[in-house]
Image (cartoon, rainbow, N blue to C red):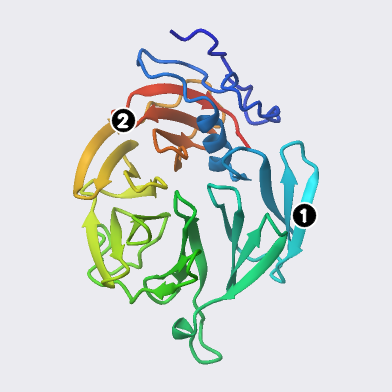
Amino acid sequence: MFAGLVSLLLAGCTTEPGPTRLDGTDQIVEPSVSSAAPPGPEFDLARRSLAGAQLTRDGKYQARLAGDWVVVSTADGAEFDRFGTGAEDARISMDFSPDGRYLAVGLPDSVVLYDFTTKDPTALPLPEEVKRPDGEPQPRTGKLRFSADSGHLVVELFDERDNSRYWLHDLHSRREIVSPLPSSIEVPSDPGVILDVAGLAVVNGGKRVVIAGQEGFLVWVPDEQTFQWRPCACGSTLTSTVDRQARHVAFLTLNDEVVLWDPGPPQEVGHWKVPAVASGAKPAVNPTELEFTENGSWLLAGPEYGHVWSVPDGKLAGSWQGSGS
């Protein structure tokens, strides 16, 4: 059943990760008794993403920040193109469209949409309605993500003084919608706190946006400009994430548990314990981040010492040690 499943327990984080083969042979380290099949390339890409890599779904291109340049390279490391950001040392976010046409780069005052068919980067300035008078702290780009069909892009407008607003782009019609400020967000462990956005997903042709945060998630309906807040009822959380299809939102709790929700209609659909760190593992620290595979069928926790489960049943398919970047 596990023929061809190669053991890959890496020799700690002092060993540089080898090249990614994308063929399903260099992935899972310790198969469990689960009957789940090995995730293969979907897992490999998600593991590298969990470690900070920015990759196209087919693995042909990757993007990285080098000073104030975004450098796009091919899988073999050859430079394909680069463009300037004018924002050296700024915190930026990136996402490739699943169809491989676009790379979106979130800068402090704009979103750059890079088109692979023309090699042209186009800057989309932040909407005027969210800007404040000169001298006041300005909202900036936070998380961003394309829809699974590559037709829409949703952008978090991060505000250090308030909850984020959201900016939706229809990439076909070029229509834009900016959300109002969400209300009625109550994080049980810290009432009144600003929501820390961990993940976004836009689905149903831009008619629904799911926003994963601490101890719960928001659902924004752009056409109605309404929000619904749903606590996860899982206690304090380290992080959360949502798959690109918005089928599931996952939470990693301070008790080393994973809690899985279906956001619509909202209901808890899974709850399992994260395995303890193996004796002698380096680093001896439990996972702190979550990442779904692009198809949403697998959930990874990592990055350095991690695990992968099938979704939604939560069956452990394997564990690994070492960075996958």
Q: Name the residue under label 2.
A: 273
Task: Report the residue at 40% width, 45% height from top.
Answer: 243
Give the image location of residue 148, x and y in percent. 45, 49
Return the residue found at the far right.
Answer: 78
Return the residue found at the far front.
Answer: 173
Residue placed most toward the observer, 257 or 261: 261
For residue 283, say whether it is visible.
yes
Task: Report the residue at 43% width, 7% height from top.
Answer: 1
For residue 67, say whether it is visible.
no
State the mark number for residue 81: 1
- Identified by mark 1, the residue type is Asp
Residue placed most toward the observer, 59 or 196: 59
* Mark 1 crowd level (few <14, some 14–19, many ≥20, 10 Å Cα): some
Task: Report the residue at 68% width, 44% height from top.
Answer: 61
Local secondary structure at mark 1: strand
Give the image location of residue 63, x and y in percent. 67, 50
29 left or right of 197?
right
Give the image location of residue 238, x and y in percent. 38, 48
Local secondary structure at mark 2: strand
151 left or right of 52?
left
The C terminus lies in quadrant: top right
Q: From this view, report whether residue 246 is shown above or below residue 325.
A: below
State the mark number for residue 320: none
- Identified by mark 2, the residue type is Lys
